[in-house]
Amino acid sequence: MKASFRFNTLVMIYAIVIAVAVLTWIVPGGAYQRVEKDGRTQIVSGSFAAADSRPQGAGAVLIAPMKGFVQAAQIIVFLFILGGAFQIIEKTGALALGVRRTASTFARRPELQKFFIPVTVTLFSLAGAIFGMCEETMPFVLIFIPLAISLGYDSLVGTAIPFLGAAAGFAGAIFNPFTIGIAQSISELPLYSGIAYRIPIWFVSTGSIIFFLSRYAARIKRDPTKSPVYELDRARALAPADAGADAGPMPWNARVILLLFLASIAALVFGILRYRWYINEIAAVFFAFGLLAGLFGRLSFSQMADEFKEGAKNMVGVALIIACARAILVIAVDGRVMDPFLHALSGAIAGLHPVLAAQSMFVAHGVINFFVHSGTSQAALTMPLMSPLADIVGITRQTAVLAFQFGDGWINPILPTSGVTMGVLGLAGIAWEKWFKWLFRLQVYFFIIALLLLVPPVMLFFYGPH
């Protein structure tokens, strides 16, 4: 009997940890000088120097996941709380009723269905472009999957609407303070300058996601068996065929829970925009919502505790993947191969034609994304190098920021080492290899679009600090 091969994301990521550890025995060590500025650690351009290598052995490889767990503890705890809170909410049945009501409305009015994907993707894209929505998409995945299935689509569509929608905005960022704001401040450019070129880019990015999803969703609606996650969605016990059925009267307590949900989302948006809330505050909002939903759903405290533990338990596999993904960076930094890697990239780019240099910066940021997924961290790590490098090769610093923006926004959604990507897929229950196969063609399209969009700023030399 032939043994079947089953892809395992955790095994793949830990294999990468081992591979990076092997590189620490081969690549000569080196380090940049770093300084603290405005609470961020920045590299001092031109300060690279050889340093003693620090080969990482078996002990380091075994310890790295634990260090990665500690470094990624915030997002991991966030997932535990999110999983627990939504398990309580799911137990009340209120969101399921709300989803059926919404699906029933769209099913009875086919003329509205064509607006479902464009409107929702645009909203998430605006959130990504204006205030850098990224980790914040995770709660919405749990909401949009049943909604998408109820409308006759699949869980890939339900996952992609919030996740790829926000990624489209991230790549076409207009005012994102966590990427554009930091990258421009490091590059000594006027804050949010260059907006006249970034707005059309946002339309291209968002429109492309809408077209891709709408076309795919229409195909799945015609024949659900074409979906790569058809069996998974059938196991979710959500019947698309019931979308047009009358959802029936909604109990008063379910209405209250849905109103609390809307209030939580409103509080979330206000807090992010007004007070710069991040993971801790977002987790607190959904934890509070989960408790209130449980009370109005007439669950006892013991029931809420049991449901919370069950939901958190479902996140353990995702937490291990995120910890191992972070372990890759732990090994690269501890083994002193990260800085030599950055130095080699900058040296290779310096001798290229300006157009190729700008495009190579984009590719370099995409490669760096494999290790550093936070846009804020990547800006602080790379822009002190890329900004003066832009001066050397004859392109504007604004173009260097644009290359960073593309590399950070359009490549992250497919990376198995990204904690957010794996967290989203974990919540959705979608295996990474299925996501990769489904998204690959769109990823190639965006790669080509990024290369093309970097040509006009270089050739016309108009994309300066204005």
Image (tube, rainbow, N blue to C red):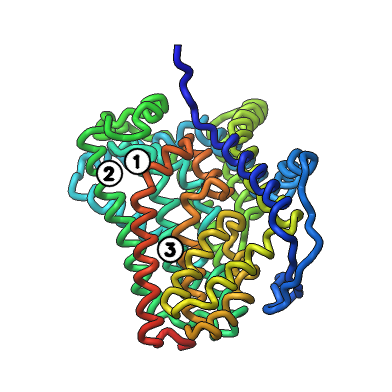
The answer to which of marks 1 and 3 sits earlier in the sequence is 1
Which residue is depicted at the point 73% across and 50% down?
Answer: 25
> Relative to residue 99, is residue 53 drawn left or right?
right
Q: Nearer the viewer, residue 71 or 63?
A: 63
**Residue 148, label in figure:** 1
Residue 252 lies, in percent from the top left, at 44, 37
Q: Which residue is mark 2?
A: 217
Query: What kind of element bears circle 3?
Result: helix
Q: Nearer the viewer, residue 352 or 6?
A: 352
The answer to which of marks 1 and 2 sits earlier in the sequence is 1
Q: Nearer the viewer, residue 212 or 155?
A: 212
Within 10 angstroms of label 1, few (less than 14), some, or many (20 or more) residues?
A: many
The answer to which of marks 3 and 2 sits earlier in the sequence is 3
The answer to whether mark 1 and mark 2 are in CB contact below 8 A is yes
Residue 53 lies, in percent from the top left, at 78, 58
The answer to whether mark 1 and mark 3 are in CB contact below 8 A is no
- Residue 52 visible in rendering: yes
Give the amino acid at mark 1: Ala
Which quadrant is home to the N terminus? top left
- Nearer mark to the viewer, of 1 and 3: 3
Residue 208 lies, in percent from the top left, at 31, 59
Query: What kind of element bears circle 2?
Result: helix
- Residue 330 visible in rendering: no
The answer to whether mark 3 and mark 2 are in CB contact below 8 A is no
Give the amino acid at mark 2: Ala
Q: Which residue is mark 3?
A: 169
> Relative to residue 177, is residue 252 drawn left or right?
left
**Residue occupying the far left of the picture:** 111
Question: Which quarter of the picture shows residue 274?
Answer: bottom right
Residue 336 lies, in percent from the top left, at 74, 59
Query: What kind of element bears circle 1?
Result: helix
